[in-house]
Structure formats: C-alpha cells, structure tokens
Image (cartoon, rainbow, N blue to C red):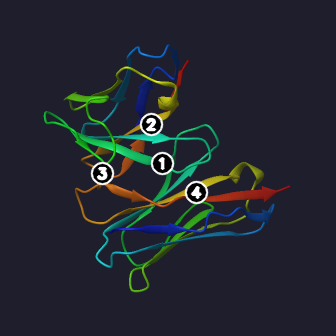
Amino acid sequence: QKEVEQNSGPLSVPEGAIASLNCTYSDRGSQSFFWYRQYSGKSPELIMFIYSNGDKEDGRFTAQLNKASQYVSLLIRDSQPSDSATYLCAVNFSYGQNFVFGPGTRLSVLP
Amino acid sequence: GAVVSQHPSRVICKSGTSVKIECRSLDFQATTMFWYRQFPKQSLMLMATSNEGSKATYEQGVEKDKFLINHASLTLSTLTVTSAHPEDSSFYICSARDRDRHYEQYFGPGTRLTVT
C-alpha cells in the first residue's frame, strides 16, 4: 500500500515567519514529488515539484527532498495571510502512474 | 500554460436526473485525465483515471455504471453522474497530466454539484 502522510494541522505561524510543512511517503523508489495549495472551496493549484535530493527554491517557496529518509518538505518564507490554505503533498511513485495525495496540512498565517 | 477548464462550475439538479461535467486541457495534450471528488473538509478522493481512447479505470468502491467517464480526445474528458442522488452532492475536480512536462498534473477549477 503506497501511502503519503501529512500532519493535518492546523499549523499556525505569525505573519513574516517561516512555515514548514512536512510530508512522508512509504515507497523508497518514488520518483517525483509535488506540492499543491488549495484554498477553501477551490481546486488545488500546483506550487512546486521536485525530483532530486536537496533543495529547490522558487520565490518564497523552497522544497526539500530527502529520499533516504523518505520525506519531502515545503518551506514558505515571509509567510503572508494570503498563504493560509491547505497544502497537499503528492507523490508519483513511478512514472506514468497516478499520484497519491496526502491528506493535506492546513496552514493559518496570523496577521 | 497548463490550463485546465471545467464546465459547469456549479450545477443544481433534481434527484434522479443525470449531469455531465466536461474537463478540457486548453493548451496541452493530456493523455491521462483524473476525476476526483471532495467532500467538505475532507481530502481529495480519486474516483477514476481515464486514458484517451480507452476505458476508464475506477477506484475501488466507485460505481462505474453511475459515474460514466469518456475520454474521447487528448483535450476532453467527461464525467456523467447518472441518476443523481443527494449523497452525490460534492465538489468534483478533474486533473490532466501533461505528457510533455514530466507528468505533472494540473487541476481544473472544479464543479460543485448539488442534488436536491
């Protein structure tokens, strides 16, 4: 059974702080990893993807992947109230196969 | 780029009727499209995977005769909810995989179905 786990939260951080969201997955052979943001009542929006070990930065977002430990994280620097949403981690266990989504972590950025 | 549209965005129908939802990839070719359902405050639930030109693969517990999926072209998939009941009221979201972009998935805006 391929599983993706996330802390459901809510994770509350003050405005301007760094928000750290974590995700673990069950299959060591997983290929690619995606972070989506979902606002209440809206569909998920792709933020970032990462394939290789290490960090990948895009603006205020940094994805970190550690395949040996089977976790991927998302850091949001200078958090804004508009970042308040549910963040979904998705894992593509092998190319051509469906993603497996985690349950999501609800982030609340307090002004 | 990588835009997926869905139509309609909202639909209200009476119990026993059928509703068709369209999902289109506007600027890329999608060999695979996915249909999800999401109830309030719950996670995405994959209903089925559809590949262009072939039958959809349904997840366990999803009735294929109730949720008819057609993927007739590389840019269009449809989901028809047949004989809808109030418990089918949910947020239905499609996503499409761009075959030229490392298999990233892009989501449509979703369709909110209310069955009265």
Name the residue at 46% across, 24% down.
Answer: B85
**Which label sits in the foreground, 3 or 2?**
2
Mark 1 vs mark 4: same chain? no
Measure the C-alpha gap from mark 1 to mark 3: 23 Å
Image spot of residue A32 (x, y percent):
35, 65
Residue at 62% over, 47% down? B41
Is residue B4 rendered to the left or right of residue B49? right
| Amino acid type for the residue under numbered disc 1 | Leu
Q: Chain of mark 4?
A: A
Q: Are marks 1 and 2 on the same chain?
A: yes
Query: Which residue matches tag 2?
Result: B93
The residue most toward the right is A111
Taking the view exactly as shown, the residue that stands out farthest to the bottom is A68
Q: Which mark is residue B44?
A: 1
Q: Give the residue furthest to the left.
A: B53
Residue A37, given in percent of the width and then of the height, sits at 57, 51
Q: Which quadrant of the view contains residue B1?
A: top left
Q: Chain of mark 3?
A: B
Q: Nearer the viewer, mark 1 or mark 4?
A: 1
Say which residue label 3 marks: B101
